[in-house]
Image (cartoon, rainbow, N blue to C red):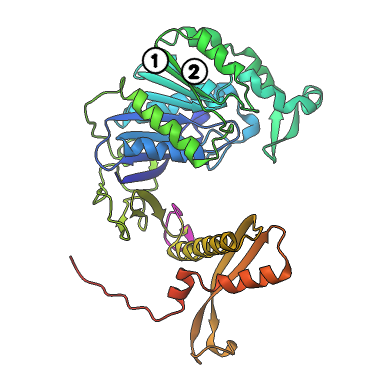
Amino acid sequence: MAIRSEKFTFPGEGGLELAARLDLPEGAPRATALFAHCFTCTKDIFAAARIAERLAERGIAVLRFDFTGLGHSQGEFANSSFSSNVADLLHAADHLKRRGLAPDLLVGHSLGGAAVLAAAGDIPEVKAVATIAAPAEPSHVEHHFTGSRAAIERDGEAEVLLAGRPFRIKKQFLDDIAEHRLAERIAGLKRPLLIFHAPRDETVGIDNATRIFLAAKHPKSFVSLDDADHLLTRRRDAEFVAEVLAAWAGRYLPATIRQPEPVDSVAGQPVGEPAGAVTAGGETPAEGTVVVTESGSGRLGQTIRAGRHRLAADEPVAVGGEDGGPSPYDLLLAALGACTSMTLRLYAERKGWPLERTSVTLTHDKIHAEDCADCETRSGLLDRIGRRLELTGELDEAQRAKLLEIADKCPVHRTLTSEIRIETELT
């Protein structure tokens, strides 16, 4: 099923504009999910994007947004707190309700999981709740600040490194997470609860899932994520969560189809087209066929269907797009880079060479024909693609030289450098 997306903002806590993305199924959605991302993450983290895409393909609209001070939302992260995150969730639920898409399902990842547990009781339309790698208490995140705790207590705030990025943490944040006790909220949830957690999660230990499960009343379920990491960076882990979540939630979600209100009829600022816009065509293309359709997201947004795969394409804001996906030239470079890497992998395996990893960096620009000594065209501008290979492994110089030569033999390279006929017809 093809999906489409809208980007817009809505007012969060304190009136700050929060950046949001609503992923919608091809037709009218049968239910709505509200997704809360992990601590210091954004709505566009891989796990959130993959789960939202899979749920939308199954007829469930998904709203994900950046909490105050993160991603493209307004405000300062230093002035946010767990309480403000919960308030932002309530504002997001209110926005959906005014659009006729009141959330049926709450999904929270990591600290976002704790936030949905805290917020669920204040959103009467919610019919089910799911957490992914969630802490049993928001105070769990305090271990990230252990080395800076004294400075925060002494100076009222300090800069800490979280996931390799600097964030300013104030004492009010620590005081706020210390005040929250989720056990009572979980016990009084009165909604079906699904808990995802990996036994070997090194960021939020499995004991947190145990505490949540014991505090909750039935119906409650636990799904082990085996060897998944905390952020679900592997595609198959994120897709597994989405598949199980969609199947489980289907038991509790409404069967009727909704007709959402256009985003510009409520207090949101649209960045795309109204929710009523429908992407044409949803069938799976035959092997070897790619179908590109306007997505309805902005002026230039496109949905690309290749077999069962879905991609997005757009142009940067500077040239009239919404930057909702790679540009056509980005996709062209990606095709060449992927083909190059695959070709080198297959060749090295056939030769039994110790190639551990290949990375291909590509650029595209225009050059004057007279600056190219070995080009047949002698005037005007020419397209130039730069390709840099990084080969990791115990390869000798002869092997590296041969792989450099093989790079030029990848099928996409040959297509781009040979005569091409493109035949266009109307259907």
Q: Residue 389, how many percent across, how many down?
A: 63, 65
Residue lying at the far left of the rendered structure:
427
Q: Residues within 10 Å of mark 2 (few under 14, many from 20)?
A: many
The residue type indicated by label 2 comes to: Leu
Q: Residues within 10 Å of mark 1 (few under 14, many from 20)?
A: many
Left or right relative to 379: residue 140: right
Magenta highlight on residue 109: no
Q: Nearer the viewer, residue 224 or 183?
A: 224
Q: Main secondary structure of the magenta part?
A: loop
Report how far apart the C-alphas of labels 1 and 2 lie in the structure: 12 Å
Establish if 223 lies above or below 287: above
Can you tell which mark lies on residue 265?
Answer: none
Q: Residue at the location (50% across, 17% down)?
A: 118
Q: Residue 79, how many percent across, how many down?
A: 63, 30
The residue type indicated by label 1 comes to: Pro
Q: Is residue 10 visible?
A: no
Magenta highlight on residue 321: yes
Can you tell which mark lies on residue 192?
Answer: 1
Q: Quadrant of the C terminus?
A: bottom left
Q: Quadrant of the N terminus?
A: top left
**Under tag 2, what secondary structure?**
helix
Q: Earlier in the sequence, mark 1 or mark 2?
A: 2
Establish if 255 lies above or below 314: above
Can you tell which mark lies on residue 117?
Answer: 2
Residue range of the region highlighted in magenta in the rendering: 317-325
Q: Nearer the viewer, residue 127 or 339?
A: 339
Q: Nearer the viewer, residue 226 or 361?
A: 226
